[in-house]
Image (cartoon, rainbow, N blue to C red):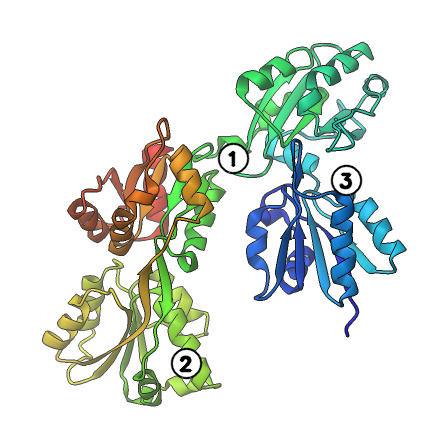
């Protein structure tokens, strides 16, 4: 049996992009993932097939499992020879009980490693535009906790003494005691006018924050509705919040945007929206299912007979090469074909395999792709392979055969199937709170949205989203199904779609 080991890994302040390279590598390779409430749920999607995921989150008033039991879980799985990642919000050794868990592992003779991370106060300060140190205001930083035991909620810190040492105070888990904390700080000598910032859900698109003073912050945070998890930053450097709070002033900050693309396709669009500050809800209205076809082997065996291979989607390109490399180990087996792609995203998928793309139309629609191919005057009596899905429009094949007199074979490598959204967490959030915009990128997403509208009924008071279309074909499907078209991308590209979102709701 292999030797087990526990990795005490910091999940960072919230944004998955702020996790360390080492942490990601361990999450992707571990046998067991033991994760907290404050560890971003997206990190769980990185695990390998067969990895056991165990939730042990704790927050005030809601305790899923005791600390002693958590430590038992770590010892048990590591003793069984497994590689265990204990994923903790922020840094494991900053108010994360990482020290307690390390001591338990050491006492049990279990090998362990600590992987540090960006702690919550650093993330909160950076995203609120607050330099924790500044030559003119603060040469020291203190990390303090509003309560040391989440199950009891007691305050053990003598805040009055910390009021006398100067510098910046970063208070974790202090929202429940903020009135007591501020009173003690003022009793210790800090002026009621001392600047204070409160940052909720730091580094995430849902981040909210405010700037007040020591004398007003308790009332201000109640009025704004800020709740845990939040960091309270006390000191003169908090003044910079007014000038440098860049995070919440991005074009889509505070906006909720629904992406309806399949999971395999949504990543790039999601990243673009999140970089602009949007909170993105994923409603994957279609699943991409790899097609099984007895004709596939014959097509690959005859690749050398084709003059053109035409890819109509990134999914088609991805699954084509997946099947290709299941049969061949040498890329040269694709032969001397010329390659056409419907758009830039599809071309990028092909170029991943170090293949040059010979043709991309100016507009990413089937008609433009067909016209661009016809303009090459290379189709007469030539063989063309169109790699497609089960819902592609037949206009491309028809034009190539009728106007180009080409011999066209179709290779359906995937199927678009409706997704069951009943268990999707983002679907629940959408129903309860709504969104500012919902993006439709294909006719099939529109059809499936309408078909599942019963599962997506908005609650009273929820935001009613503006419906934004990827292009004219999607817009036509929306109109046919009775979905209003509030905006349409000028071009059928993700950048153009994002620009339409900013113009409509930014």
Q: Residues within 10 Å of mark 2 (few under 14, many from 20)?
A: some
Do we see residue 155 in this rendering? yes
Q: Which residue is mark 1?
A: 206
* Point 12% across, 80% down: residue: 405
Q: Nearer the viewer, residue 146 or 428?
A: 428
Where disc 3 sits, the SS reads loop
Mark toward the start of the polypeptide (1 vs 3): 3
Mark toward the start of the polypeptide (2 vs 1): 1
Q: CA distance from mark 1 to mark 3?
A: 23 Å
Instruction: Give coordinates of residue 366: x percent, y percent.
Output: 21, 63
* Point 33% across, 35% down: residue: 465
Q: CA distance from mark 3 to mark 2?
A: 49 Å
Dividing the picture into quadrants, the one containing residue 47 is bottom right
Q: Which residue is mark 3?
A: 94
Mark toward the start of the polypeptide (3 vs 2): 3
Q: Which residue is mark 2?
A: 324
* Point 73% across, 27% down: residue: 171
In the rendered view, tell whether residue 164 sits above or below residue 207: above
Q: CA distance from mark 2 to mark 1?
A: 42 Å
């Amino acid at each position: 049996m292999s030797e087990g080991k526990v990795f005490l890994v910091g999940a960072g302040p919230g944004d998955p992009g702020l996790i360390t390279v080492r942490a990601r590598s361990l999450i992707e390779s571990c046998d067991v993932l033991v994760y907290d409430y404050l560890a971003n749920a997206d990190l769980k999607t990185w695990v390998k097939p067969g990895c056991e995921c165990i939730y042990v989150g704790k927050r005030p008033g809601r305790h899923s499992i005791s600390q002693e039991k958590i430590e038992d879980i770590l010892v048990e799985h590591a003793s069984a020879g497994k590689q265990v990642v204990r994923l903790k919000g922020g840094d494991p050794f900053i108010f994360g009980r990482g020290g307690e868990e390390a001591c338990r592992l050491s006492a049990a003779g279990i090998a362990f490693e600590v992987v540090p991370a960006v702690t919550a106060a650093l993330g909160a300060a950076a995203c609120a535009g607050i330099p924790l140190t500044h030559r003119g205001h603060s040469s020291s930083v203190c990390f303090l906790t509003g309560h040391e035991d989440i199950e009891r909620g007691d305050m053990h810190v003598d805040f009055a003494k910390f009021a006398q040492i100067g510098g910046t105070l970063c208070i974790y888990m202090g929202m429940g005691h903020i009135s007591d904390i501020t009173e003690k700080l003022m009793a210790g000598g800090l002026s009621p006018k001392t600047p204070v910032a409160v940052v909720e859900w730091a580094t995430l698109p849902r981040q909210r924050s405010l700037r007040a003073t020591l004398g007003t912050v308790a009332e201000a945070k109640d009025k704004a509705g800020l709740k845990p998890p939040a960091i309270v930053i006390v000191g003169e450097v908090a003044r910079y919040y007014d000038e440098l709070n860049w995070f919440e002033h991005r074009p889509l900050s505070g906006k909720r945007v629904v992406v309806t693309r399949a999971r395999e396709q949504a990543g790039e669009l999601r990243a673009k929206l999140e970089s602009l500050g949007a909170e993105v809800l994923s409603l994957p209205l279609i699943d991409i299912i790899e097609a099984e076809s007895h004709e596939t082997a014959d097509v690959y065996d005859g690749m050398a007979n084709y003059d053109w291979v035409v890819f109509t989607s990134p999914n088609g390109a991805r699954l084509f090469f997946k099947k290709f490399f299941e049969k061949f180990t040498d890329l040269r087996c694709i032969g001397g074909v010329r390659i056409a792609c419907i758009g830039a995203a599809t071309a990028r998928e092909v170029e991943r395999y170090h293949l040059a793309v010979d043709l991309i139309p100016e507009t990413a629609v089937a008609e433009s792709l067909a016209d661009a191919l016809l303009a090459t005057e290379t189709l007469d009596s030539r063989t063309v392979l169109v790699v497609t899905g089960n819902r592609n429009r037949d206009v491309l094949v028809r034009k190539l055969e009728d106007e180009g007199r080409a011999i066209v074979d179709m290779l359906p490598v995937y199927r678009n199937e409706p997704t069951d959204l009943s268990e999707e967490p983002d679907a629940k959030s959408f129903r309860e709170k709504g969104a500012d915009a919902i993006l439709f990128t294909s006719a099939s997403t529109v059809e499936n949205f309408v078909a599942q509208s019963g599962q997506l009924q908005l609650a009273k008071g929820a935001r009613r989203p503006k419906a934004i279309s990827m292009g004219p074909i999607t817009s036509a499907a929306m109109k046919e199904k009775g979905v209003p078209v509030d905006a349409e991308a000028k071009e059928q590209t993700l950048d153009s779609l994002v620009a339409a979102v900013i113009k409509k709701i930014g």
